[in-house]
Image: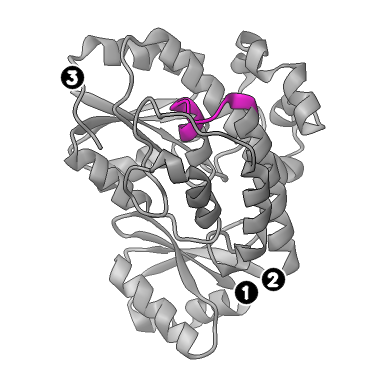
């Protein structure tokens, strides 16, 4: 039996997260991280305030640090590597660091720059995102096409799981969905509490800043394949910078990545990080899979024991 690790993206943060990790992993979450960030990671994660933690430029590095520290705790307890990994948006950076493509601190530097760039792009225009429930990918694309023919900027931003699609656009585009959605066959629409239209053309100004942050970083061979958001297929580490720059303004094809991993032998998915979002997406996309969650040190120990008790065999994933 083979396992893959999944890492969460922005939106999974909450005040109080990582309390046990700050005590256990000062080597990863200590003063040196605060110096790199220019603010106290521990204070923000443990004490908030929430309105600061949810800001894109703070939430992204905070989630990356805690998810990576949990991965280290889990991997230290395991005798085998996963045969695949993926992360949702920001989580893709955690997956790359876990696979050894980049080091922890250099990845954190890029994540910090990415968070700032995306926050600036979001502040520049009035935009947002909306989840559509019970909608297949084709209908979502059709809805976006209809709106764009009327002069809108609506796009499909996240293809998360069967029946769960996220759209991105200007505020007028989201108002249009709410007004027209039911007549177009959309059962339920939920406007998301995010700063802007991530993974859309609204983020185009952020791309050069992400590219600049990646200059000078040399990717190392991945210890296991990382499935890219932009394609749902294993990332070519020789083109990792190009892929990450493209990712900022491109749809997240998370369901495609989960399905591809399952086709290539993954039977167990392990969500590593705050929240449970990627665990839920894995359950919906690959119902036959076992899904485990690592949110804290206790979870890391329990999941490591569960994995160790299973008979895993390394598959040949591309």
Judge by depth and name the residue closer to the eye, 296 or 158. Answer: 158
Relative to 94, 62 lies left or right: right
Q: Residue at x 68, y 53 (%)?
A: 209
| Residue behind mark 3 | 313
SS for tag 1?
A: helix
Q: Earlier in the sequence, mark 1 or mark 3?
A: 1
Q: Can residue 217 be seen in this view?
A: yes
Crowd class of label 2 (few under 14; some 14 to 19; many from 20; radius 10 Å): some
Name the residue nearer the viewer: 14 or 195: 195
Residue 191's place in the image compared with 100, above or below, is: below
Query: Where is mark 1, residue-wise?
Result: 171
Which callout, 1 or 2, points at the residue further toward the start of the chain? 2
Q: Residue at x 51, y 51 (%)?
A: 242
Which tag is nearer the camera, tag 1 or tag 3?
Answer: 3
| Residue at mark 2 | 126
Give the residues in magenta: 95-105
Disc 1/disc 2 C-alpha distance (Å): 6 Å
Q: Quadrant of the C terminus?
A: top left
| Element assignment for label 3 | loop
The quadrant of the rendering that contains the N terminus is top left
- Which image quarter: residue 162? bottom left
Q: How many labels does the image show?
A: 3
Residue, x 72% and y 16% (percent of image)?
Answer: 30
Cβ–Cβ below 8 Å for labels 1 and 2?
Answer: yes
- Where disc 2 sits, the SS reads loop
Q: Residue 56 carries which label?
A: none
Q: Position of residue 140 (x, y in %)?
A: 37, 71
Q: Estimate the spatial distance between the alpha carbons at disc 1 and disc 3, rounded to whole Å.
A: 49 Å
Q: Which of 18 and 237 is in front in this view?
A: 237
Query: Between marks 2 and 3, how big is the CA–CA gap?
Result: 49 Å
């Amino acid at each position: 039996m083979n396992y893959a690790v999944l890492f969460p993206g922005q939106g999974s943060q909450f005040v109080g997260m990582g309390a046990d990790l700050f005590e256990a992993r000062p080597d990863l979450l200590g003063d040196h991280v605060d110096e790199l960030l220019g603010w106290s990671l521990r204070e923000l994660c443990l004490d908030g305030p929430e309105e600061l933690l949810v800001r894109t430029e703070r939430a992204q590095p905070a989630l990356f640090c805690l998810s990576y520290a949990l991965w280290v705790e889990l991997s230290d307890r395991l005798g085998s590597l996963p045969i695949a990994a993926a992360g949702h948006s920001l989580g893709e950076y955690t997956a790359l660091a876990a696979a050894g493509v980049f080091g922890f601190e250099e990845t954190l530097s890029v994540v910090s720059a990415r968070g700032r760039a995306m926050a600036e792009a979001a502040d520049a225009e009035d935009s947002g995102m909306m989840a559509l429930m019970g909608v297949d990918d084709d209908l979502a694309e059709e809805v976006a096409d209809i709106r764009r023919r009327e002069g809108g900027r609506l796009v499909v931003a996240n293809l998360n799981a069967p029946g769960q699609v996220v759209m991105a656009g200007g505020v007028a585009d989201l108002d249009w969905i709410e007004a027209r959605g039911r007549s177009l066959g959309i059962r339920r629409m939920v406007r998301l509490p995010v700063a802007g239209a991530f993974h859309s053309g609204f983020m185009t100004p952020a791309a050069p800043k992400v590219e600049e942050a990646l200059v000078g970083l040399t990717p190392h061979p991945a210890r296991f394949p990382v499935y890219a958001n932009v394609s749902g297929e294993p990332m070519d580490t020789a083109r990792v910078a190009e892929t990450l720059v493209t990712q900022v303004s491109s749809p997240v094809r998370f369901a495609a990545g989960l399905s591809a991993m399952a086709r290539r032998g993954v039977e167990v998915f392990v969500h590593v990080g705050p929240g449970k979002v990627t665990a839920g997406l894995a359950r919906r996309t690959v119902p036959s899979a076992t899904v485990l969650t690592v949110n804290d040190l206790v979870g890391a120990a329990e999941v490591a024991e569960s994995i160790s008790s299973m008979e895993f065999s390394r598959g040949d994933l591309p």
